[in-house]
Amino acid sequence: MPDPALQTLEQRLNAIPKLPDSQLTKEWAALFGRPPPRRLSRRLLELAAAYQAQAMVYGGLRQSTRRKLIDMARRRATATEKPERKPRVALSPGTRLVRDWHGRTCTVEVTEQGFLFAGQCYRSLSAVVRTITGARWSGRRFFGL
């Protein structure tokens, strides 16, 4: 015999997407004990109401998990610094860049005018890589700079 609480949960979950807006707001208030935040999309109201209904039957997140999530959200909200980027490597004339591409060793020499590859001078490293691969790639990324 099926558990009556699970039967009513299933019925409740099936009914949530079909509720009119006013009834969905009442359902939210009944589940959370307060009215929903303003300007919350209908889809988010539905998902949150469904989650809360399930949490009431099966139990929600552990307190330690809730604390971790709140802590992560606070740290993210207060983080003003951008992640550190690797310093850009300066390429001096005479530097040789080597990369194996499909069994072929590709060597590019940095010159005063640009980049020398297979006897031809290119203005950018990305143009060299386009010649090698036939696709648009970042030259720096291709050579691991």
Image (tube, grey):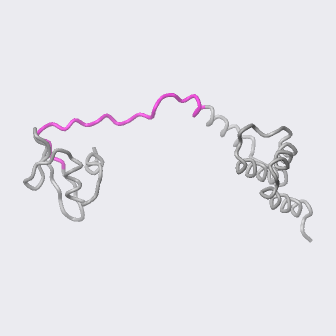
Q: Is residue 16 magenta?
A: no
> Quick one: 64 or 11, which is closer to the camera?
11
Work out which quarter of the rendered image holds the N terminus and state it.
Answer: bottom right
> Image check: 20 left or right of 102?
right
Q: Is residue 103 above or below residue 97?
A: below
- Number of marks in the image? 0
Q: Residue sitting at 90 percent across and 68 percent down?
A: 2
Q: Is residue 94 visible?
A: no
Q: Residue sitting at 24 percent across and 49 percent down?
A: 126
Q: What is the chief secondary structure element of the magenta stretch?
A: loop
Q: Residue furthest bottom?
A: 1
Query: Which image quadrant for residue 77?
Result: top right
Q: Is residue 73 visible?
A: yes
> Quick one: 91 or 115, which is closer to the camera?
115
**Residue 116 place in picture, x, y as percent:** 11, 48
**Residue 94 place in picture, x, y as percent:** 10, 41
> Image check: 72 left or right of 10?
left
Work out which quarter of the rendered image holds the C terminus and state it.
Answer: top left
Q: What residue range appears in magenta?
A: 75-97
Q: Is residue 77 magenta?
A: yes
Query: Which image quadrant for residue 104?
Result: bottom left
> Image check: 97 left or right of 45?
left
Q: Residue sitting at 66 percent across and 40 percent down?
A: 69
Q: Residue furthest left?
A: 119
**Residue 132 place in picture, x, y as percent:** 20, 58
